[in-house]
Amino acid sequence: MAGVILAGFYGCSFLLGGELGAIVQAGLETVPFAILAILAYLAVAQKSLRWMAVAWLYGLVALIAFLAFNSSFLAVLVNPVLRPGMIPEFIEGGLINLVFICAGLGLSVLAGSLGFLPAFRQGLSRRLPIDPLNFVHTIALVTVLILSLLPFMPLIFLGEPPLLVVATGFADSGETFVDRDNAGLLRDQVYRLAWLIPSVIFAVGYGIRRNLWQALARLGLVRPSLRQIIIGVGLATLLVVVVTGLDLLLGWLWEQTGWARTDGQAFGLIVDFALTPIGAVVLGVTAGLGEELAIRGVLQPRMGIILSNLLFTSLHALQYNWDGLIVVFFIGLFFGFIRRRSNTTVCAIIHGFYDFIIILAVVLEMPGFEF
């Protein structure tokens, strides 16, 4: 049944085309994980469904591993713009790097699968608020472990984030990186958030273990008070100052060591669609609320601050080099401690205003703010 639902999503997105197709396709990033959570919850009472949940998990892992491999494949080509009939030409050492990346992806899956071992879960339960005998927690743990490792593999073996390499290659060839205009890409952010909100509600057991209010409480999603909003805006501003200082420090350190930094110009190609005042608002709301609901709302109460933040960082590994990932990890730790002391809503306010300030500063070409 779950496979039929996902196949239906793919089919509808291609058949509908246009804006309706884009709306449906936006759900492909979050709905499969909601289905995984639902299968896991149902399997608690119906143990015959456990094999289905595990199969669905590894199907998702295979898809994500393929996406990581595909971006790496394009990154090691002399020209990433492939057309029908073209024979791929690899850069020097590109093919061997692909072999290492494949091995790394496989090892990531094996390492994350240790979460299925009872003794392994028992040991982690001394550090994490998980029940080692709970099947839902087991599926969540294995998913987080694998996805915390997979996205790092291309960066480790390529030495640079593949998406930035591919974006630069497309720009150098005079081609567009995505087949959608800037307004459409902004709308896609809204569509993804619209799918993510119900997905995370179902992911914490709505309709099976919890009612709506219990699900929202589990997510830490509350109506913010005026005081929380003011505090959130203030902390976001402070975070901008601290992160700017951290970025300058890392820049100096990387310059002294000769390590490769995140290519700001290439990163700008990826986020160019949002570099307007409206884009700053849209990305602030969608990224702030969406990422906080998924990481600090769904995962942190079970996976703890460090492990959930490792996943948060890994999700940026295809587009940031190590200097950028250190900043992301620091920001994630900050949000993690805010979540522990308050709720996900406050995290989303801080995260949203932080992104808004950064993007608006870039748009206004303020000194010290550029990609």
Image: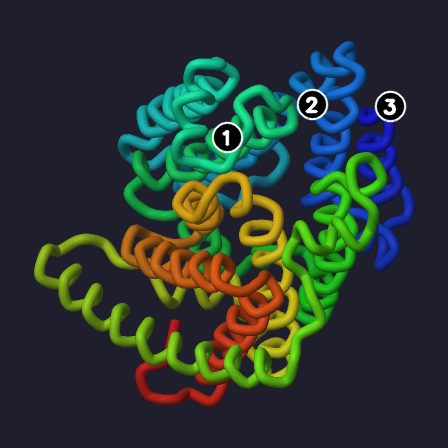
How many angstroms separate mark 1 from mark 3 (CA)? 39 Å
Question: Which element type, helix, strand or loop, lies under badge 3?
Answer: loop
Quarter holding residue 206: top right
Question: In the image, is residue 129 above or below residue 239?
Answer: above
The picture quadrant where one finds residue 48 is top right
The quadrant of the image that shows the C terminus is: bottom left
| SS at badge 2 | helix
Q: CA distance from mark 3 to mark 2?
A: 11 Å
Q: Is residue 307 above or below residue 221?
A: above
Q: Quadrant of residue 50?
A: top right
Residue behind mark 3: 1
The image shows residue 354 at horizontal and vertical percentages of 48, 75
Q: Characterize the local packing of mark 2: few (<14), some (14-19) or many (20 or more) Cα atoms within 10 angstroms.
A: many
Amino acid at dot 3? Met
Is residue 1 depicted above or below 335 in this figure?
A: above
Q: Earlier in the sequence, mark 3 or mark 2?
A: 3
Confirm or deny contact between disc 2 and disc 1 (CB under 8 A): no
Q: Which mark is residue 87?
A: 1
Q: Is residue 281 left or right of residue 21?
A: left
Residue 56: mark in rendering: 2
Camera-nearest residue between 159 and 248: 248
| Label 1 SS | loop
Categorize mark 1 by other alpha carbons within 10 Å: few (<14), some (14-19), many (20+): few
Circle 1 or circle 3, nearest the eye: 3
